Image (spheres, coloured by chain):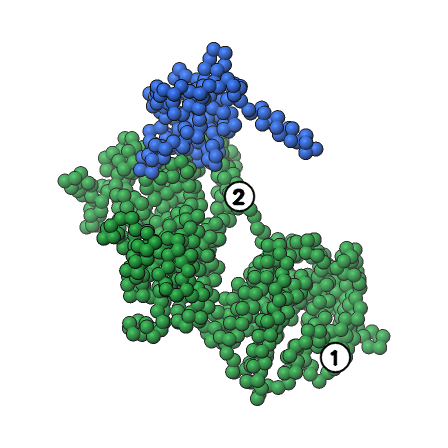
Chain colours: A green, B blue
């Protein structure tokens, strides 16, 4: 079973393990917050069990052993419910384990061999387990002996808890398994069954014998089923229960064999229906390699699940539910769909059709229109990913940092559902980590210092994402000590960064020095920051996706770092207006209202600036045709339309010729050659093939 | 096999060598290297971009791709002319981006061997000189060969853009 001819499985393993690790990380952190594993223990146990199984199957022993030791630990916690446990210590060690596994898996993903040895970690975990046991021995006893796990000891811990009085291998069973027809890779499934059984039983014989290496075994298993003989001290029910968790199992027969006398107990017909439950598909994917030993609680739920759906449509194996696609191909697809929409409009609005009576043509055209619109929506949504997973990762950073630096910090996450382009997601993670580290290390004070200053001892860190004015903003705000202007100035002087009189420097300019390479005002270099290589990389990374960084700070009150991403590739709702021959799109998010002027008074000041009174408030008017020097016939305010736009609580009335309608548009960047156009964020293709320019509302406010 | 491919490849390169697309602006015939040219399209609807130098006419939608268009006539500081059905947009690909060049009309593809190309005279006699890479001779005709890079990446044009 080399990895080369096993790529789909390997890919799945990598994908699934990384996903599980993220999930595990989150549950750990949340359970640490709630100071107890009560709610999450089953999930953690299940995740570790899954990872152990799949890693063992993929022959990554280091991962599987580590997972096993963590599983041991949590098994003890779950079964014995010891009272005296140090949640933090356990969380720490398990998080270390998570890091280890993530690291190894990413090695595997990048084509390296996973070679790190986990024995150090495993030893630590075992030590913790032994400690916990010592602390809690008074009430618990019987399991102890089994816990110091020996690798080759066939007698595993979880059977012993229920069968302590029985010696191993008391019963001899024979099991016949038949897999569902469409399941594919029968040999590997059979192998996982064997692997699973090995934990609790002595396997004496199975047929076909050479499950993995021999390709014909697939057919044999498909036709005749898979036969296993094994010795175990589990009861028949337990064996059946265990085997019935095998995925894609169609038929299961288990016999009890005693002295060559076969006693047939029961025949089971199992339809593994949850396979067809689409909602559970992803969960199923996780379980494909799983040698399942679910806890009792889960078992009780399973039959309910199984009964839910009985349709027998063939769903291709759940593996294909996630694929990774080259972004370039997606871009091409998006362009093609754009063209399709345009050509559709060219056909259905063809001048040749005018005046013809074409009922069924229009009917068909409407259908086409519906489909192309849907297609466009789907293509647009493919690239968009919510920020939540990136944001959730920050919980971990905050936790680790605050523990190591002995500061108490609470991270508040807002707007994690904001969707941004995949490109941005990939690039944003590292900068965010840097900024958050800086905030905790430099910004937020020690608890004692905070108390002296009369602040709440708990440092607050807010991570917020929002769409504003058509931009995506990510804001990191702390309530720490703020930036030290003097220190920054001194440092800037040392590095020769100041190239104009110092008293002319604005606060913003001073603060922005922190984004220069090699700039750190921190005297001591800590594990997390202070080397001065952080912030300039942050800025570089963000600029690579076309973003900008702003920093705001008030001494003693905290620092706010705002990252703004341009509209590039984001999809926005926009209102398209006509000015002369040109079309402009205003992001709907910044529009307050639009109206025609009837009798509202228009005021002109001595400089010729127009203002309009709306409901007792005066607002300035910006005539787009004047602003952009466009020829249009409609110059009288009363003939056109007013669109009221808002940005940072400033309001402006934009005057245009006419409204063309509202639609979702894909923002395309302007060609490099002219990207500096004033107040234009990008352009978009309208359904009729026309290009519309997207207004950068924030810039218009700046230049108006 | 690879040898054959290589020769094929070379010969393909060869077919483009020395070939120039010639177009007319006013009375002059200009030429650009054919390897820069992606396609030639008729004049189509141009979306104006405000605040651009006059020769940057705007952007067009070329099958979903947004490309800027430059009026070469205006770029050379000649009198503007109404576009008509002979007006063409020559789409050129330079380095990593495409630009459309609006020309009065496209004439033909000619082969001008390197040794028939002479350097332009030193004395600067007109505005357009700095965009001329050389002068190609074909029989009695002369064609002004344009340096595409200069035409597009001109310094003063960059400055204008940044304003």
N-terminal label among 2 and 1:
1
> What's the residue at 44%, 24% (across, down)?
B133
Residue A653, picture quadrant: top left
- Quarter occupied by the C terminus of chain A: top left
On the picture, is B64 further left or further right than A224?
Answer: left
The residue wearing badge 1 is A168
* Tag 2 residue: A328
Query: Dot 1 falls on which chain?
Result: A
Relative image position of residue A358 (x, y in whole percent): 49, 31
Along the line of sight, which residue is nearer the eye, A322 or B115?
B115
Asked if both marks, 2 and 1, belong to the same chain, the answer given is yes
> Which residue, as the protein is rendered here, is positioned at the far right?
A260
Name the one closer to the observer, A419 or A307: A419
> Does the rendering let one see residue A518?
yes
**Residue lying at 46% horizontally and 26% vertically, measured from the top left:** B90
Residue A175 image position (x, y, % from top left): 76, 69
Q: Residue at x 58, y 27 (%)?
A: B13
Q: Is residue A522 above or below residue A666?
A: below
A595 vs B86, left or right, is left
The circle on residue B85 is: none
Q: Is residue A68 left or right of residue A661?
A: right
């Amino acid at each position: 079973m080399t990895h080369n001819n096993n790529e789909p499985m390997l890919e799945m393993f990598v994908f699934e393990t990384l996903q599980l690790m993220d999930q595990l990380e989150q549950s750990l952190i949340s359970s640490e917050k709630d100071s107890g594993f009560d709610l999450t223990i089953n999930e953690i146990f299940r995740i570790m069990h899954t990872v152990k199984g799949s890693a063992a199957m993929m022959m990554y022993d280091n991962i599987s052993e580590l997972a096993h030791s963590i599983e041991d630990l949590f098994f003890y916690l779950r079964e014995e419910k010891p009272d005296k446990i140090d949640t933090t210590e356990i969380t720490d060690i398990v998080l270390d384990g998570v890091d280890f596994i993530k690291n190894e898996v990413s090695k595997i993903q990048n084509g390296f061999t996973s070679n790190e040895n986990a024995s150090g970690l495993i030893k630590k975990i075992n030590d913790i387990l032994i400690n916990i046991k010592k602390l809690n021995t008074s009430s618990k006893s019987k399991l102890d002996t089994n816990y110091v796990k020996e690798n080759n000891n066939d007698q595993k811990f979880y059977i012993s808890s229920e069968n302590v009085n029985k010696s191993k291998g008391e019963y001899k069973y024979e099991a016949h398994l038949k897999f569902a027809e469409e399941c594919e890779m029968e040999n590997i499934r059979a192998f996982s069954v064997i692997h699973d059984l090995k934990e609790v039983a002595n396997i004496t014989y199975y047929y076909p014998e050479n499950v993995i290496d021999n390709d014909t075994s697939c057919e044999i298993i498909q036709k005749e089923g898979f036969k296993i003989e094994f010795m175990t001290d589990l009861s028949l029910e337990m064996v059946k229960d265990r085997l019935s968790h095998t995925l894609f199992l169609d038929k299961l027969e288990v016999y009890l064999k005693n002295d060559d006398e076969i006693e047939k107990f029961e025949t089971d017909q199992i339809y593994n229906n949850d396979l067809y439950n689409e909602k559970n598909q992803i969960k199923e994917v996780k379980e494909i390699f799983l040698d399942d030993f679910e806890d009792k609680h889960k078992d009780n739920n399973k039959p309910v699940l199984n009964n839910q759906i009985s349709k027998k449509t063939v769903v291709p194996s759940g593996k294909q539910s996630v694929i990774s696609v080259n972004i370039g191909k997606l871009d091409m697809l998006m362009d093609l769909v754009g063209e399709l929409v345009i050509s559709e409009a060219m056909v259905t609005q063809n001048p040749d059709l005018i005046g013809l009576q074409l009922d069924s043509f229009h009917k068909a055209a409407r259908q086409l229109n519906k489909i192309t619109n849907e297609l466009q929506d789907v293509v647009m949504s493919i690239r968009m990913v919510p920020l939540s997973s990136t944001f959730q990762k920050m919980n971990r950073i905050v936790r680790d940092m605050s523990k190591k630096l002995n500061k108490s910090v609470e991270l508040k996450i807002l707007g994690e559902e904001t969707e941004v382009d995949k490109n941005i997601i990939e690039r944003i993670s590292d900068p965010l980590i840097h900024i958050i580290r800086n905030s905790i290390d430099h910004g937020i004070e020690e608890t004692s210092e905070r108390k002296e200053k009369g602040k709440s001892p708990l440092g607050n860190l807010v991570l917020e994402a929002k769409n504003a004015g058509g931009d995506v903003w990510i804001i990191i705000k702390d309530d720490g000590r703020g930036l030290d202007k003097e220190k920054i100035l001194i440092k800037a002087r040392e590095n020769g960064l100041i190239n104009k009189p110092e008293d002319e420097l604005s606060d913003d300019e001073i603060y922005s020095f922190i984004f220069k390479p090699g700039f750190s005002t921190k005297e001591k270099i800590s594990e997390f920051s202070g080397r001065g290589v952080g912030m300039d990389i942050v800025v570089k990374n963000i600029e690579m996706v076309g973003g900008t960084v702003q920093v705001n700070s008030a001494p003693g009150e905290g620092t706010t770092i705002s990252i703004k991403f341009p509209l590039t590739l984001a999809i926005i709702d926009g209102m398209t207006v006509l000015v002369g021959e040109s079309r402009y799109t205003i992001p709907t998010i910044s529009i307050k209202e639009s109206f025609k002027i009837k009798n509202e008074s228009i005021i002109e000041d001595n400089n010729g600036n127009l203002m309009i009174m709306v409901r007792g408030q005066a607002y300035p008017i910006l005539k787009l045709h004047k602003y952009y020097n466009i020829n249009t016939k409609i110059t009288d305010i009363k003939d056109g339309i007013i669109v009221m736009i808002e940005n940072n609580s400033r309001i402006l009335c934009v005057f245009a010729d006419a409204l063309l309608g509202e639609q979702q548009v894909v923002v395309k960047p302007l060609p490099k050659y002219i990207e500096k156009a004033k107040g234009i964020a990008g352009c978009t293709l309208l359904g009729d093939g026309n290009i519309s320019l997207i207004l950068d509302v924030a810039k218009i406010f700046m230049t108006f | 096999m690879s040898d054959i491919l290589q020769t094929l490849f070379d010969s393909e390169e060869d077919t483009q060598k020395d070939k120039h697309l010639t177009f007319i602006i006013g009375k002059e015939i200009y030429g650009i290297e054919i390897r820069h040219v992606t396609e030639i399209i008729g004049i189509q609807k141009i979306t104006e971009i405000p605040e651009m130098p006059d020769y940057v006419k705007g952007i067009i939608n070329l099958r979903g791709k947004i490309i800027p268009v430059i009026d070469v006539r205006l770029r050379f500081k000649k009198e503007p002319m109404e576009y008509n059905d002979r007006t063409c947009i020559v789409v050129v690909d330079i380095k990593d981006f495409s630009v459309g060049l609006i020309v009065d009309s496209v004439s033909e593809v000619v082969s001008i061997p390197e040794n028939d190309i002479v350097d332009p005279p030193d004395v600067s006699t007109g505005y357009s000189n700095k965009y001329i890479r050389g002068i190609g001779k074909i029989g009695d005709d002369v064609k002004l060969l344009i340096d595409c890079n200069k035409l597009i990446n001109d310094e003063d044009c960059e400055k204008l853009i940044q304003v």
